[in-house]
Image (tube, helix red, strand yellow):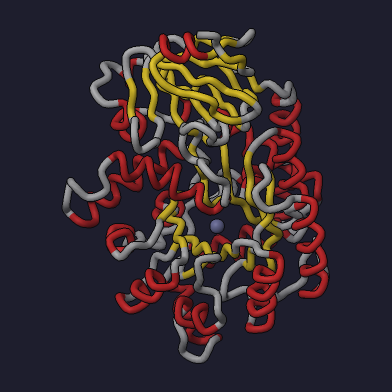
Amino acid sequence: MQSELCDMIVTGECLISQDESRPVLTGGVAVAVKEGKVAAFGKRSEVLTEWRSGDVRDLGESLLMPGLVNAHTHVPMTFLRGFADDLPLMEWLTRHIFPVEAHLTREIVALGARMGMYEMMRTGTTSFVDSYLLEESVLETALSMGMRCVGGEVVFAFPSPAYSGMEGAAELYRNHAERFPAGSRVQTALMPHSVYTTNDDVLASCRDLAEELDLMLHIHLSESSGEVAQSCEQHGGRRPVSYAADMGLLSSRSVLAHMVDLTDSELELVARSGAQVVHNPASNLKLASGFARVDEMRSAGVSVALGTDGACSNNTLDMFETMKLAALLSKGSTLDATSMPAADALRMATVDGARIFRTPGLGTLSVGAPADMIALDLTEPNMIPVFNPVSHAVYSASGKDCIMTMVDGKILYEKGCYLDGCYEDTRLALGDLVGWVRDRAAGK
Ligand SMILES: [Zn+2]
């Protein structure tokens, strides 16, 4: 039989495919990549018989798996990593973060975004959902750095550096929807910030615009008890979820980040709506917001993805840490060690988060899926021995065990090297910003 030509073949020791027919393979595996997609995966001997390429990469004793999906973050905020810690959400946001962000420039956003993307590709994340000010810089940076991104300009009821008024925001979104179209590697989604930083008009406009442009709509919702109190005060006694429902924001188009403070009836409402939830365990714990009722949401049929939130409230973008934390928090909060098994946590960090991208096959290594793949080093002490690769991915690995990151069939990071060659410049430039941030925070 004549073998078929492909662009690259990657070989390793075992593989998690998330493909329902052959979820986990061990004893020597390979993935053939062609035109940015997975052309074949399976036993090494079979793939090497059926496929050939001038680029065969043997990653030795490694675990090949789909790249992780960070379903809620603000990548430019790496420039504020460690700047204001150990504070409650509203004080942290209004007294420390917003005053510095009032001085943002496109250059700072792009610089922070670059570092965030380096961190994600270093720690095994290939796709991320982002919202921030001057988000165009994030979208452009994702395009040039090769990462997969759904990004949207954050919409407030107050002035923004990227647009003036809701009409300006709508114009910006129409432009972004054309430049970063649905289904492509870098695409946009409507991102009203929250119910406490917007109003009826802004939320209604965002909802209508998402319909008009056929975009997903992503919002921070019910993140803390403080937000709930504020919502009741601002919106005639309505808690964030019922207010969002009244505004038509709960649908299969919606992605709701956090959802920490949730009543039984709100949980049912969200489940009926088909909205997706993003659980951000590290950020919720660090800001003392509490923890989401993830197990009850999942039992009610809600699709729950995982996110890190920004590097300022986490303080890393390592999705391996987030996966483990989600699984442990589930067990600790339910006092049930069988709640959220490793395979469920991995599914949340891959397939469930991938739904937001509306890209068939994303989050798996199945045939025809985008070749978004990572490899973990199984020779590290924390990865030995191997009984169950899924267990290692969730409980034993850290992002630093990642030795290769590929998006759309292109390797972005391999064995200590960021292949765009700009890491050093980014690192030095971001270090130089520390003084600038301190001066802005001091009102200089
Ligand atoms: Zn957030």
Q: Residue at x 31, y 40 (%)?
A: 343
User: In this image, 233 relative to 417: left or right?
Assistant: left
State whether residue 427 is above or below residue 328: above
User: In this image, 440 relative to 243: left or right?
Assistant: right
User: In this image, 26 relative to 243: left or right?
Assistant: left
User: In this image, 118 relative to 72: left or right?
Assistant: right
Of 224 and 412, nearer the camera is: 412
Location of the C terminus (image quadrant):
bottom right
Q: Residue at x 77, y 71 (%)?
A: 159
Residue 15 can be seen in this image: yes
Q: Residue at x 32, y 62 (%)?
A: 293
Q: Residue at x 48, y 38 (%)?
A: 68
- Quadrant assignment for ligand 1: bottom right
Where residue 41 appears, as percent x and y from the top left, is: 45, 23
Q: Residue furthest front?
A: 1
> Which quarter of the picture shows residue 413?
top right
Of 125 and 223, nearer the camera is: 125
Where residue 153 appears, as percent x and y from the top left, is: 71, 59
Residue 316 can be seen in this image: no
